[in-house]
Each structure stands twice: as C-alpha cells, then as structure tokens.
Amino acid sequence: MKLINHRVLRGSRTLLAVSLFVLPVIGLCGNGTVPVSIHGVNYSGDDFSYVVEDPQDSTNKGGGESIGPYEAGGTMCCYRLPQTWRRGIQIKVHAVHSARLSPDKAGPEIAETQIVEVPEYIDGKTGELWVIRAADGALSAVSSDFQPNHAKWPGAVKGWPVPSLEYKRQRWGQYMKLAQDGLDTANEALAELKISPQKLVAGSWKLDQKYQPKSVQEFSGPEDERYVEYVRQKFLRMKRNSEEEVRQVQERRP
C-alpha cells in the first residue's frame, strides 16, 4: 500500500509541475497570438457600427455592434492580436455611420473601410482591442486593458465621450417637440369638444371599449353626457401634464 501511495504522490507532483508550466500559456494561440475582447468608443455625433478584420487572415474578425453618438459599446468577442507588439500591426476596420445632426434627424448610411495601425502595447502587454471613432470621423484602434478614463489609456482623446453642445441642443429639440406635440393635441381635442364633439367622442369610445372597457362600463355609450365629460376631463389632464412637461423641458435647455 505504501508503494502505491508513493506512486500516487509522485504522479500528483508531476501533474502539478506540468500544470504550472501550462497555465501561463493556456490563452495563447498556436501562431503566437492572443484572443482579446473588442470594444468600441464613439466620440462623434453620428451613429456608428464596425467590424474588425485581420488584413492577412480574413478568418480573424469580430465586432458588429452599433454605437450611438457620444457613447461606448459593450464587449464583443473576439480578435487575435500578436502576443508581442511590433511595428506594423494593422487592422482592417469596416465601418458604417449615419449622421444624426441633419434636418431629418437621420442621414443615409455611409460605409467605409480603413486600415489602421495598432500603437505600442501599454506596459508591453497585449490588451483588449478598442476601435475608436473620433469627433471628425477618423478611425483608430488601440490595445489596452485600461478604459478611456484611466491615466494609462493610450487613446488620443482621454476620458469617455462627452456630447457636444450642438448634439445636446438637437436632442433637447426632439424632447421639446414631443412635449409640445402632446400639448397641441390636447388643445385641439378640447377645442373640437366645444364645437363638434361627436366624431372625437365616438372614436374615444371605440378605443376605451377595446383597451380599457372597465373604465367606461358605467356609461351607456358615446352619447352619454357623462361620458362626454369624462373625455373632456381626460384631455384636460393631458393638457396640464403636457404644460408641465413643456415647462420642465424648457428649463433643461442646454
């Protein structure tokens, strides 16, 4: 029995030694590359999506997420980067963007492909791959385990994206229009109820009967004067709420 125990012990030591040797290199691919996660950072006012591809190996690709203006994406898998940095590491970036700052709020999609070079790794270590779209639309990539708000972030722009004043005002205008549209709808309905309420009340009755029948079960129909008053009160509440929303949005104007 002791002999068996010694053999088991020697086998365990051998397995431990092999494990200690293998663990540091378990993440390496056979060609000296390391699989890394992919992120996108968008410092522009456009919607932006991307796919990265190795110019020398089309099977090495990843990405595909869409990123809104002045936002950062999630975590995508995966891309293989050389374990050791050298000059000339290139990545092909297939990108699509569409303008948000246009009169119709969304311009046509524009596709482009650029070859970008990966700068030197931070502390000599392969990091995650970050695809960056600058404010002027220029594309770049860095390898870093540090996020944009870290002191060691290697990107040209430090920090997470911050919306421009132009973009913030454009977004504010959209919220303002929604609030004003609600107020206009309420005022128009109240005016119609004074002049010729039949059509509006009949339409409201059909909707109430379909979507919230319990709320109108006490009324005999659209001709019921109590129901007409019920509809009027509903639009009065809508007017008050919309007026308050317009006031709040006006106060938030950037």
Image (cartoon, rainbow, N blue to C red):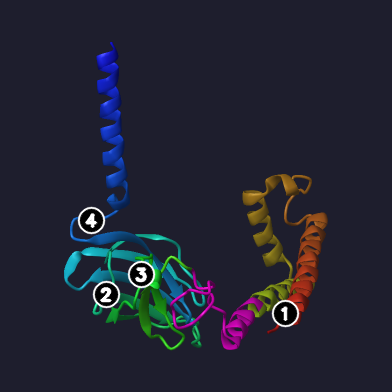
Residue 140 covered by magenta stretch: no
Inspect the image, locate mark 4, and give the three-letter code of the amino acid beneath it. Cys
Could you tell me how far apart the alpha carbons at marks 4 and 3 are, in whole angstroms?
Answer: 18 Å
**Side (left or right) of 91 relative to 240:** left
Residue position for label 1: 252
Residue position for label 3: 124
Residue position for label 4: 29
SS class, disc 4: loop
Could you tell me how far apart the alpha carbons at marks 2 and 3 are, in whole angstroms?
Answer: 19 Å
Q: Give the residue displayed 75% in from the left and 57% down from the top.
A: 223
Q: Are marks 2 and 3 in contact (CB under 8 Å)?
A: no
Residue position for label 2: 91
Residue 56: % across, % down = 16, 71
Crowd rating for badge 2 (residues with CA inside 10 Å; few <14, some 14–19, many 20+)? many
Nearer to us in this view, 15 or 240: 15
Inspect the image, locate mark 3, and give the three-letter code of the amino acid beneath it. Gly
Main SS class of the magenta portion in the image: loop
Could you tell me how far apart the alpha carbons at marks 4 and 1 are, in whole angstroms?
Answer: 52 Å
Residue 166 covered by magenta stretch: yes
SS class, disc 1: loop
Q: Give the residue displayed 72% in from the left and 77% down from the top.
A: 249
Could you tell me how far apart the alpha carbons at marks 2 and 1 are, in whole angstroms?
Answer: 42 Å
In this view, the mark in front (4 or 1): 4
Crowd rating for badge 1 (residues with CA inside 10 Å; few <14, some 14–19, many 20+)? few
Mark earlier in primary sequence (2, 3): 2
Q: Are marks 2 and 1 in contact (CB under 8 Å)?
A: no
Residue 183: % across, % down = 72, 75
